[in-house]
Image (cartoon, helix red, strand yellow):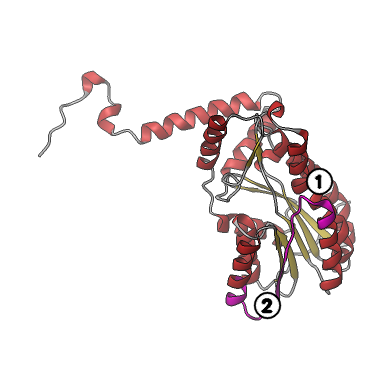
Amino acid sequence: MTTRLPKYHFAGGTAVVTGAASGIGKALAHDLAARGSNLVLVDRDARRLADVVAAVRAANPALDVGSHVVDLSDTSAARRLGETLLTECTRITLLVNNAGIALGGRFDQVTLEEFDTVMRVNFQAPLVLTHTLLPALKASPGSHLVNVSSLFGLIGPAGQSAYAASKFALRGLTEVLRHELPAVGVGVTAVHPGGVRTRIAASARVGSGVPVAEALRHRREFQRLLTIDPAEAARVILDGIEHRRTRVLVGWSAKVPDIVARLFPASYGSVLSALQAANARCRAAAATPAWRRRPAGDRRERRTH
């Protein structure tokens, strides 16, 4: 029997958000504050995090906004963070495991150490924080857990072995928890963003075996896919939390691949490649002047005045 929880109430709650110094995490911090949530913001980038904290406090002086600078690739540091929050926070009603890093390169172009770093940040840290903070979430009936997976937690494209593995693992953990935790008063949401304009492409790590020219080309291609405003992504995510949705896909760049992968589980790669090629042709045609798109024999001489 499925346990149905009432809508999540942001006002007066306390939200812990990792990866809060930029991108989706920064947008979530501002939107959560606008909805009345006290905040504990976590990131490894001290300067950017301090800027976010200052801006949120200035706009919301009545709220309690705290921060912790932590490198979540250090599993022991992640555990210490959780233990600290248990003692510092009288109440935690929302945990958003948003922090993540990317690593480009084929499986044979990355080292096991590079692979493991991605797994520690993208999967091990959410695992540790969720496990450590779960008593606090259970102590606040109506609380909520959010794990931000990815489009690459829905599909596994070439060149993304570590990132996809970490995000599929996080998706699997979240699906189990959404069957376990509502019975103890905790809602659960898995988030799969599509192409959101974040720093993930610019800050992505590159496998040590990837040639420089290849890495730069893939980075440029990936950057072009990031078109969704982080503020819009945050709105969609928080609306999903409010209505206790177990799964939130952000943007058509996540929804279309999800549908294709469901329809063609064994061959979605070739289908998505064909759709991508067709979309590129459409964009190229749209950018071409109409007179150039007509057959050569039908073109009229262009007059200038």
Side of 202 relative to 153 (left or right): left
Q: Is residue 204 magenta?
A: no
Q: Is residue 70 magenta?
A: yes
Task: Residue 146: give x, y in percent of width and height.
Answer: 75, 55
Q: Is residue 122 above or below residue 283?
A: below
Q: What is the span of residues highlighted in magenta in the rendered image?
A: 56-77
Residue at coordinates 58% horizontally, 50% vertically from top-left?
199
Quadrant of the image for the C terminus? top left
Q: Which amino acid lies under the numbered mark 1 shown in the image of this protein?
A: Glu
Q: Amino acid at mark 2?
A: Leu
- The answer to which of 36 and 3 lies nearer the viewer is 36
Find residue 275 and report its horizontal and vertical position in percent.
Answer: 54, 29
**Res 175 label:** 1
Q: Residue at x 68, y 44 (%)?
A: 150
Secondary element at tag 2: loop
**Mark 1 Cα-neighbour bin, 10 Å: few <14, some 14–19, many ≥20:** some
